Structures are given as C-alpha cells and as structure tokens.
Image (cartoon, rainbow, N blue to C red):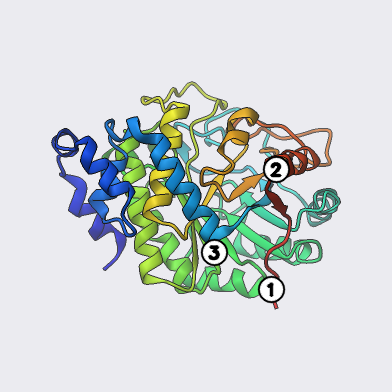
Amino acid sequence: MGFYEKYLEYKAFNYEKYFERISDEAVLRIISKDVLEELDFLALLSERAGRFLEQMAVRSRQLTLQHFGRVIFLYTPLYLANYCVNQCVYCGFNVTNDISRKKLTLEEVEREAKAISSTGLRHILVLTGESRRESSVDYIKQCVEVLRKYFCSIAIEVYPLDTEEYAELIEAGVDGLTLYQEVYNEDTYSEIHLKGPKRDYLYRLDAPERACKASMRSVNIGALLGLEDWRKEAFMTGLHGKYLQNEYPDTEISVSMPRMRPHVGQFQPKYEVSDRQLVQIMLAMRLFMPRAGITISTRERAEFRDNLIGLGVTRMSAGSTTVVGGYTQEEKSGGQFDISDGRSVEEMKRMIYGKGYQPVFKDWQAI
C-alpha cells in the first residue's frame, strides 16, 4: 500500500468535528503516552492543545535528548542551477518569472565546494530547479563526483526521479534526499501547480518511497506551510513520515516545516502560520515520531531559530544562500526565496555552543 491510500483515508475526514471533542484531560493524557496513535497526533495539533505547549515542550525535550543527545547537525545548501519548466505560483524559480537563470559549470561547482568546505561543513544539500534538460541526472552525477572530494554526506533536493535514477545517484555518492510535497491537499495542489511535470501529484507523492526502495540512507519530507490549513498539512506530513519509517526502517526519516518566504512573483499565501503554531507543529511531531530528525532552515529568523534549540530541532542550515553561485560569484542568479537568518557557520557554531549543545559538522561517511 502506498501512502496515497493513507491520504485517502483522511481526505473526507471531519477535522473540525474531531477538534471540538478534544478536552484538556485528553491532551494531557496523550502527552504522557509512550506511543501515540494517528488521532493522538492530530489532537496535539488542535487549538486546545495549543494551551499546553509547555507540557509538550518538556516531553519533546526528553525524547529529543534520549534519541539524539545534545547535538545540532549543520549543513548548507548549494544551488547548482535555477532553470525550471514548472509554473508554480509560490516559487521564485517559476518558469514565467523574469529572473537571471544560471547553471554552474563543474569548475564553478568546485570553487563553491572549496568555499563551503573551508567553513568546516562536511554535509551539503544540492539543489536544482526542475528541468531535466538543464539539470539532467548525468549532470547531477558529474557534480556529485566533484563534491565527493570535499563532503562526506551529499543530499539532493531536485525534481522527482524514478527508483533506478535514485539508485544511479546513490552509486555516484548521494546518500540523502529532501523532497517536499509542497501541499498534501490534492485539490489545492492542482490549483497552484499550473503547468509542467510537477502537476503530477502522485508521482511526486511517491518519490520519497522510491528513494527508500533504492536504499537512500536518509529521506527528508515536508509541506510548505501557508499553502493550506497548517493543521491538516502537518498531520499529513507526520503520517507520511511515520508510513516511511514503518515501511523502510533502515532509512533515516526526517521532517522539515518550511514556512512561505518572500520571492519573485505576486503570490501571497492564504494561511498564516505564527511562531507559536510552528512550535506546536514541531512539538507534536516529536511526540508522534521520537526518532525522526527535525530540520529548521534559514527561512526562519535568527532569534526564533535560537529559541528552538532544546525543543526538538536536530538539524539546521548555516551560512546559506538560495542563489546559484552564491558562495563565490559576484554576479549572482535569481534566488528561489529570501532567507531570514544570514549568519555565518562560525556564528551559528558559537550560538549552538552557547546553548549548551554541540554543533556537528560530520556524523556519517560513505564507505
């Protein structure tokens, strides 16, 4: 059974009626449980559960320390190209947007790699726009061959691939995948993906599972918060993560909770997600999936990210840029979105130590 079958179980679910039945006693009972069921998780996303964030935070901290210790894993994104064939209304790479397009040569990839690795980082996330012509699997493989000289862990955030293509990239040196469904609501998905191969909801939805089948070491999923009701989207993200954990126990499953950020274009999100609500999502996610990694990127502002340490987050980006050639080139391309936390790797390192945690630059090495 693929995850789509699980999605269909809840497509017509009456969330509002369920939330009305949640009591204070039920929330407190769920927080104290060792293992949460699906509807327990949903209850922790309710408005009523929002009154008990302190109790949720205590439990989340306990579980995070138990499974991860006092460490924060650091990585940075590297954009190889921003060519894209999709017309997604919320994205700066939208094919109709008038931005400077660029694709790095292998020599430029090496210069970017040297600059990033000089900061001490050994984990990198490679990104491209969704264009098979400009960012082919062969091109990505060539870039990975260059990056292997500088990084012990290389993850990709590219267009969805077939199982065999994921296997090719794993053979080349890729060990991680990040792929956001963007929005789980199937109707909304059709409304905001106007043209291009990304309109294929099911092909994207099944991509993380195809990567797991290809023996990807780690897979990170998420929904872009602001495109739909955050409670429903967070619930589906958690169900998707738990499904992958259960079906593929050898793959490390992580979850991201990215909020919409300003970008080139006129799209404005329909739903606001406050800081408090984002914290509630993170805490509920930790209680539902104690072993899952939780990533908070530089989409979020510095002070807010600092305060999340100790509450459940395990992975943070540092020294980030969302433009192609952003680490070494003066003439830069158009970025995918604006970042909020522009601190350097060294600044992030000092902050994490100041919180009583240890920044980890390298936690895994391919044989």
- Among the two numbered marks 3 and 2 on one chain, the one whose residue lies closer to the N terminus: 3
Residue drawn at the location 56% of the way across and 50% of the way down: 131
CB atoms of marks 1 and 3 within 8 Å: no
Q: Count residues near mark 3 (Cα–Cα under 10 Å), then give few for <14, some for 14-19, many for 20+.
A: many
Q: Is residue 225 visible?
A: no
Q: Earlier in the sequence, mark 1 or mark 2?
A: 2
Residue pictured at 71% horizontal, 51% vertical: 359
Could you tell me which secondary element the residue under label 3 belongs to?
strand
Residue 221, placed above or below residue 336: below
Q: Position of residue 268 (x, y in %)?
A: 44, 22
Dot 2 amino acid type: Ile
The vertical placement of 262 against 107, above or below, is above
- What secondary structure is found at the residue carrying circle 1? loop
Label 1 vs label 2, nearer the camera: 2
Q: Residue at x 22, y 43 (%)?
A: 26
Q: Position of residue 265 (x, y in %)?
A: 52, 24
Q: Which mark is residue 290?
A: none
- CA neighbours of label 2 inside 10 A, class few (<14), some (14 to 19), many (20+): some
In front: 357, or 185? 357
Question: Does any portion of residue 218 appear in the rendered image?
Answer: yes
The quarter of the displayed image where residue 188 is located: top left
- Residue of label 3: 218
How far apart marks 1 and 2 lie (CA) works out to: 26 Å
Tell me whether circle 3 and circle 2 mark residues in contact (CB < 8 Å). no
Tag 1: amino acid: Ala
Residue beneath label 1, please?
Answer: 366
Q: Which residue was labeled with disc 2? A: 352
Q: CA distance from mark 1 to mark 3?
A: 12 Å
Asked if labels 2 and 1 touch by Cβ distance under 8 angstroms, the answer is: no
Mark 3 or 2: the one toward you: 2
